[in-house]
Image: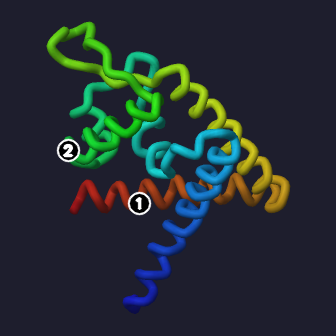
Amino acid sequence: MRAEDHVLFSQLLRNPYETFLMKVHAELASAGYADSYPSWGTNIFHYLREGGLRLTDLAERTHTTKQAMLYTVNRLEKAGYVERVPDPADRRAKVIRLTERGWDLRRVADEIMSSMEEECIRRLGQQRMRQFEDLMKDVSDVLGEHQERG
């Protein structure tokens, strides 16, 4: 395989994802969340559930350093999207969880993403979208197997 083929494969994976993030972010900004950042949705909001997570767990799940996550959480907290509360299992520790504003942003983002998926289905057809989903799952499985052996 030629070197440019590797670049093409990575771009085929990256370009739609980056386009997706930028479109979601633009729509969020139009909906009144201009102080959000594209990386927040994938790196943080996805992992924060009702109970929240400790900083170290959030950093681990998002594959970032604790220091980088601390910086991001500080920005999210300042913007009113998350709060730090005592961990019920260990009062010395803090859990990061979404605030009402954070849940609102997540709801709006979910609506935007659903609309984007519906547009793809409308333009590409249900069958092609199912094929795409199946293919992406298969690619993820293959890459996951490669990582496990690596």
Between the residue at mark 1 and the residue at mark 2, the CA separation in whole angstroms equals 32 Å
Label ID, residue 70? none
Vertical position of residue 122 compared to residue 36: above or below? below
Looking at the picture, tell me which residue is in the foreground, 131 or 60: 60
Residue 142: which numbered mark, if any? 1
Residue 60 lies, in percent from the top left, at 25, 40
Question: Could you tell whether 141 is left or right of 21 in the image?
Answer: left
| Location of residue 123 (image quadrant) | bottom right
CB of mark 1 within 8 Å of CB of mark 2? no
Mark 1, Cα crowd under 10 Å, few <14 / some 14-19 / many 20+, is: few
Residue type indicated by callout 2 = Gln
Q: Which residue is mark 2?
A: 67
Is 59 left, or right, of 90 in this rendering? right
Q: Secondary structure at mark 1?
A: helix
Q: Amino acid at mark 1?
A: Val
In the rendered image, the quadrant that contains the N terminus is bottom left
Q: Is residue 124 above or below residue 116?
A: below
Write the residue at 36% across / 55% down.
Answer: 144
At x 34% / y 42%, what residue is drawn?
Answer: 72
Residue 56 sits in quarter: top left
**Which x, y percent locates residue 46?**
47, 36
Quadrant of the image for the C terminus?
bottom left
Determine whether, in the image, residue 90 is placed left or right of residue 100. left
Camera-side residue: 64 or 67? Answer: 67
x%, y% of residue 131? 68, 58
Q: Residues within 10 Å of mark 2 (few under 14, many from 20)?
A: few
Nearest-to-viewer mark from 1 and 2 = 2
| Front-lying residue, 129 or 28 | 28
